[in-house]
Image: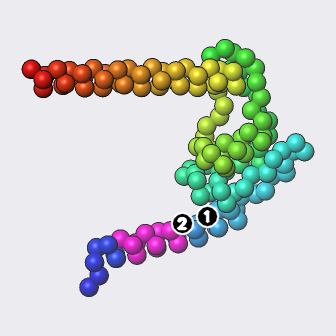
Amino acid sequence: MKSEKQRRLEIKQRRLARAKSMVNVYNAYVPLQKAPVDAVLADLSILESNNNTYGSLPQFYVDRPFACRKCAAEEVWTAKQQKWWYEVAHGDINTIAVHCRSCRMAERKRVEEARHASAEGMRKKQEALLRGRGNVGTN
C-alpha cells in the first residue's frame, strides 16, 4: 500500500509528463511566422516554462511604442528590453511597459525614501520603548 505522499508524487509526475507531451503537440500546430528584420527571436523553452497561458507565445519581439501613464511621454519599449523582461526577469507574458524610464526612476526613488523614513521611524520607536522600559525598571 502506498502512502498519500507517494500517490501525490505519482500524480504530479503523470501531470507533468502529460503537460510536456501537450506542449509538443501544440507547438507542432503553431505555424512559424516570418520575423521582421529588426526583431529579436524569443526563446520558447523559457517562455513555456514561465508562463501559464492559453494564448500563443510570441516567436519574436519587435519594438513597441507606448505613452507613459503618468507624464504621457512617447517612448519605445525595445525588443531587447522585452526579451529581458519576459525571459530573464520572468515577467508575465500579458504585461507591457506603461511608464517611461524617468517616471520609473522617480517612483523607485520615492519608494526608497519612504522605506528609509519608515526604518528611521521604527528605529526611533524602538529607542523610545527601550528608554521607557529602563525608566520603569529603575523606579
Q: Is residue 69 visible?
A: no
Coloration of the structure image: rainbow
In reply to whether residue 11 is colored magenta, the answer given is: yes
Q: Specify whether 7 is left or right of 48.
A: left
Provide residue 33's location: percent of width, then percent of height: 80, 52
Report the quarter where the N terminus lies: bottom left
The residue depicted at 65 percent of the width and 34 percent of the height is: 96
State the SS at label 1.
Answer: helix
Instruction: Find out whether the residues at labels 1 and 2 contact each other: C-beta distance under 8 Å.
Output: yes
Q: Residue type at mark 2: give it.
A: Ala
Report which residue position mark 1 lands on.
23
Question: Which image quadrant for residue 68?
Answer: top right
Provide residue 25's location: percent of width, then percent of height: 64, 67
Out of 33 and 38, give the one closest to the viewer. 38
Report which residue position mark 2 lands on.
19
Q: Which residues are magenta?
A: 8-19
Q: Residue furthest top?
A: 71
Q: Residue type at mark 1: give it.
A: Val
